Image (spheres, rainbow, N blue to C red):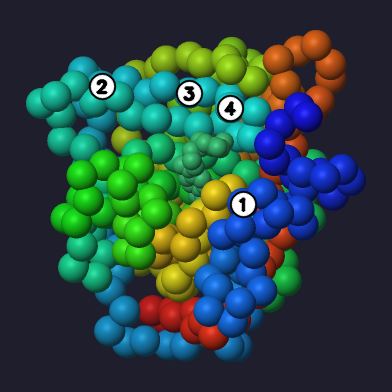
């Protein structure tokens, strides 16, 4: 078999079959907390004391740090490589500190699909995941990944609309041609990650969930920013040139989103009435 898991509805490795080889991916038990989900706005619960996530060092561009951009066949991942003296990007939320380890993208072939989370059934074309682990309670990402409270992922939706390029995403997207195939990597200078986010304060949705790819560990506190960021159609077209294989055949890397999972016993909280 070509890959242990993929996003194809046809074949035996698609999302509906992940649970066969990765049992944590099943969302059948009423106790399960799989991601992504459809967020039904009328069913979200306003919590006046829900804290706003505090972004730390997202506004710093270290001259001494780099970013590795790599195509792993499932997505493009951007990983900060910090010089030892450089302060790392973090989110503080509900009394815990989480350190950014990587961010990556899920996207679709047209504007009606691509995001993993949906809001009232509506998809956005791109969803960016800023993946953090809890440095108060864990020594590294891999230790945190399997544990309740271990991870925090901040989701930012993008839509292609603007005719002029989004300056933040222009730091990354033009590099995609260097990571066209699975296994390709490239390095760029560090830049300010807050240029990739819509401005706070926004309406956020907050709920307990999981990694959206195998092994689907139920360790993630999700924060979904309801406000979208616009990129240009030219920037969007760069996503659609990526390939999920090493180049022997023509396999587009696209529609790399998991279908929404059952909400089960969960409540989605929001910070705006
Ligand atoms: S997500 O934000 O819920 N989509 C991982 C991190 C975040 C999410 C999903 C998965 C993760 O770290 N998975 C384990 C490592 N991966 C590498 C990778 O980045 O994705 C190995 C793998 O899958 O088996 Cu390709
Ligand atoms: Zn993701």
Q: Residues within 10 Å of mark 1 (few under 14, many from 20)?
A: some
Numbered label attached to residue 65: 2
Residue that label 3 marks: 69
**Cα separation between marks 1 and 4:** 19 Å
**Camera-side residue of 262 and 189:** 262
* Disc 1 C-beta below 8 A from ligand 1: no
**Camera-side residue of 27 and 175:** 27
The residue shown at (25%, 21%) is 65
Q: Work out whether mark 3 precedes mark 1 in sequence or the reverse, and give the earlier one.
A: 1
Q: Are marks 2 and 1 in contact (CB under 8 Å)?
A: no
Position of 186 compared to 133: left or right? right
Numbered label attached to residue 72: 4
Circle 4 — which element?
A: loop
Image quadrant holding the N terminus, namely top right
Q: Comparing marks 4 and 3, which lies closer to the viewer?
A: 4
Residue that label 1 marks: 22
Circle 2 — which element?
A: loop
Residue 44 percent across, percent down from the top left: 52, 84
Residue 42 percent across, percent down from the top left: 60, 88
* Disc 4 C-beta below 8 A from ligand 1: yes
Q: Work out whether mark 1 precedes mark 4 in sequence or the reverse, and give the earlier one.
A: 1
Image quadrant holding the C terminus, namely bottom left
> Can you see residue 127?
no
**Cα separation between marks 2 and 1:** 36 Å
The residue shown at (89%, 46%) is 10
**Cα separation between marks 4 and 2:** 22 Å
Position of 75 compared to 254: left or right? left
């Amino acid at each position: 078999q070509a890959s242990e898991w993929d996003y194809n509805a046809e074949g035996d490795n698609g999302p509906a079959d992940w649970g066969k080889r990765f049992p944590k991916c099943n969302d059948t038990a009423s106790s399960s907390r799989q991601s992504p989900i459809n967020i039904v706005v009328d069913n979200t619960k306003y919590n006046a004391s829900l804290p706003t996530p505090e972004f730390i060092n997202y506004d710093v561009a270290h001259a001494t740090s780099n970013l590795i951009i790599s195509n792993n066949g499932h997505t493009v991942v951007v990983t900060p490589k910090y010089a030892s003296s450089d302060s790392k990007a973090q989110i503080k939320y509900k009394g815990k500190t989480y350190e950014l380890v990587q961010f990556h993208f899920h996207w679709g072939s047209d504007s009606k699909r691509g995001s993993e989370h949906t809001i009232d059934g509506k998809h956005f074309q791109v969803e960016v995941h800023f993946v953090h682990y809890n440095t108060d309670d864990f020594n590294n990402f891999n230790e945190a990944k399997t544990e309740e409270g271990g991870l925090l992922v901040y989701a930012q939706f993008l839509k292609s609309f603007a005719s002029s390029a989004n300056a933040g995403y222009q730091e990354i997207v033009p590099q995609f041609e260097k990571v066209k195939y699975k296994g390709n990597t490239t390095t760029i200078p560090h830049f300010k990650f807050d240029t990739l986010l819509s401005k706070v304060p926004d309406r956020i949705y907050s709920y307990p969930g999981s990694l959206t790819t195998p092994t689907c560990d139920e360790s993630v506190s999700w924060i979904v920013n309801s406000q979208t960021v616009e990129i240009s159609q030219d920037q969007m077209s760069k996503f659609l040139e990526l390939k999920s294989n090493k180049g022997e055949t023509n396999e587009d890397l696209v529609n790399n989103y998991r279908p929404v999972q059952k909400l089960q016993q969960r409540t989605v909280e929001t910070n705006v009435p």
